[in-house]
Amino acid sequence: MEKFILKYFTLIRTLIAILVGVIISVVLIYIISEMPAYALKQFLLGPVLSVSRFSNVIENASPMIFCGVAIAIAFQAKQFNVGAEGALFLSAAVGTAFAVSTGMPTVFHIILVLIVAGITGAVWGFVPGILKAKWGASELVSSLMMNYIAYFAGLYLINSHFRDKNAGFLVSIRLPETAWLPQFIPGTRMHLGILLSLVFAFLGYYFLYHTTTGYEIRTTGHNDKFARFGGINVIKVVVLSQVISGMIAGIGGMTEVMGIHHRFNWQNSPGYGWDGVIVAIIGRNHPLLIILAAFFLSYLRVGSQVLNLMADVPSELVAVIQAIIIILITAEAFLSKWKYRITMKQAELEEAGNESIA
Amino acid sequence: MNPLLKSILSTGFGFAILRVMTPILLPAMGVAISELAGSVNIALEGIMIMAAFFGVIVSAFTGSIWLALLAGIAAGVTSGAILAYFHLKLKADIILAAIALNMFASGFTIFMLYIFTGDKGSTSSLKSLVFPEIQIPILKSIPVLGPIFSGHNIMTYIALLAVPFFYFLVFRTPLGLRIRAVGQNPHAAESVGINVNRVKFYALMLSGLFGALGGLYLSMGYVSWFSRDMTAGRGFIAIAAATLGGNMPMGMLWASLLFGFVNSIAIYIASLDIPSELIQMIPYLITVIALAIFSIKVQMKKKHVEGARELYSEEVISGVVKDISSDGD
């Protein structure tokens, strides 16, 4: 048992953090609500009580998975590039512009639009990457700034050049049907992009853990001096991690446009890039765990919306909970005494065992 | 005359720049003070929204502007201290902890807003106070300068006075010296007996103080209510302003003025047929370019005068040693 705890310590710690978060939310609901049992049921079970809500959980998880994998690849290289938000926004705008100005058979159209979006995102990741790798400029600051540039550039592109003047609000022209991602379950908005997000999570996992470049990324993130000493081209790795990160976020943004609304309808940044940071942290930067983390976060979000709608507790409860979960996961000292005690006990046991053999 | 030019040349425009600049300059100093101590603080967004919220709530329920000021500052400084505690004591990565703090602050303030008012949008149902506007005696009667520089909210003047204060704090006080020493070389600072973690802790609390003043201004000066997520990214813009200003007081003043100028233009031309997005983009573009140029410069300097740099940090450290031996700490 104790060996098991030590082996999976980070995973267990993450689960405990999540548990603490959920317990705090239950306590908060009991403090605030006048009908706590009902409210709690709505919060925890609401998302599975109707098809449309559950499909909401899955739909919302998709961009979180894209952005989570994108952020994780940068984070694994210890690059605090938080530019997924900007890459997603601008790529979706550029992809939309490209999609409405071209026409071709559907499969080609879809692939080409995704490629354009991916390239846009990659360029967006390249700038902070090269600034960091060559001259040591903080990728955190530059990627934050790039988010704003992307936001304004995307808005300019859509509002000034590709705006649907017949629509009553600020949205782009509708994409030609050849560029729509098929929705595969009638009555829901579940679309091919969701499957694509899973594919990208698996590709991301394979890339990080089963390719040389992935190994180089993780080694650089772990200890860049060691990586350099071991002959890894750290500059290349630092740039590449952020280029790939931007590309994945860009494709993710475009699938949202192509799969759900079929037009660019964001006037505010949708925040998926920041959700990506959250699920990357909860999923420990592991693409497969990120899938689970995204579903978890998406479930909480939908649950909180149901809670807000059906009971008397504001949905912002979830923002508070996710902040607590994240800070507990990132606080390395959290539960470290526990681990220390188990490690010591194990060591003593082993020593005693060795002595008895001798 | 061209309508755009006409509005830019009006005194109202100059007034607007100072008004818009205030909630950027104050948190920018918050970013800078922690940056100088070697910790990146991207939590100003959360710090500001907490201060903005508690200021309004306390002023509405107590009717005292002083208690509101105190509550706002306490909220900001506490947020800074929480960040410091998680970062320094519980060994959380400061960037991730700050992201969590921002998220928490946004959610928590809306949550509490709902508890207090039953509304999730704003505190418009509460009667909250604002900080006074100050007419500067002689200045106000001077043409052109008067309408631009007089009659601002007191927080705008506090922000302007914070510029020399920041300089004094960083370059003329023992704490400032320690902050710089820790930021430049924590190991060297430690070797002369500076408690690195404590200095960083103080710097993050100061960061919370500057952020709190910016947040208080937003909800009790810039407008007279609290509304959800009213910081609207100013905590991040502050990072841009601090970076663009090289974390130095005058530099940050100019950078904040640039942001104020550009945002005021965006408001003024909203009625004209010019895409405001492109103009609003400019300061961020300038920041990225400035960051690049700055980094290239630093690296070139590093390569050419490695030795000189060491000398400089030695000088700072010896200053600390002198300082410590003189105040008998």
Image: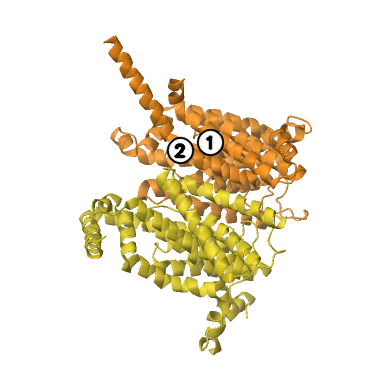
Write down the chain letter for disc 1. Answer: A
- What percent of the width, then of the height, locates residue A14? 51, 33
Q: Nearer the viewer, residue B259 or A280?
A: A280
Image quarter (top left, top right, bottom left or bottom right) of the C terminus of chain B: bottom left
Name the element at disc 1: helix
Judge whether residue B10 can be spotted in this image: no
- Based on the displayed image, in which of its 4 quarters is residue B203 positioned? bottom left
Judge whether residue A89 can be spotted in this image: yes
Q: Amino acid at mark 1?
A: Ala
Q: Colour of chain A?
A: orange
- What percent of the width, then of the height, locates residue A101? 67, 47
Q: Which residue is mark 2?
A: A334
Can you say whether A208 is above or below A170 in the image? above
Can you say whether B14 is above or below B91 in the image? below
Q: Colour of chain B?
A: yellow
Residue name at image x 44 percent, y 44 percent: B93
Q: Nearer the viewer, residue B65 or B218?
A: B65
- What percent of the width, then of the height, locates residue A348? 33, 22
**Direction from residue A296 to residue B167 in the image, left or right:** left
Name the element at disc 2: loop
Q: Dot 2 surroundings within 10 Å: few (below 14), some, or many (20 or more)?
A: some
Can you say whether B96 is above or below B135 in the image? above
Q: Which residue is mark 1?
A: A17
Q: Amino acid at mark 2?
A: Phe
Image quarter (top left, top right, bottom left or bottom right) of the N terminus of chain B: bottom right
- What percent of the width, then of the height, locates residue A168? 78, 55
Q: Are marks 1 and 2 in contact (CB under 8 Å)?
A: yes
Q: Dot 1 surroundings within 10 Å: few (below 14), some, or many (20 or more)?
A: many
**Direction from residue A58 to residue A344 in the image, left or right:** left
Residue name at image x 44 percent, y 43 percent: B92
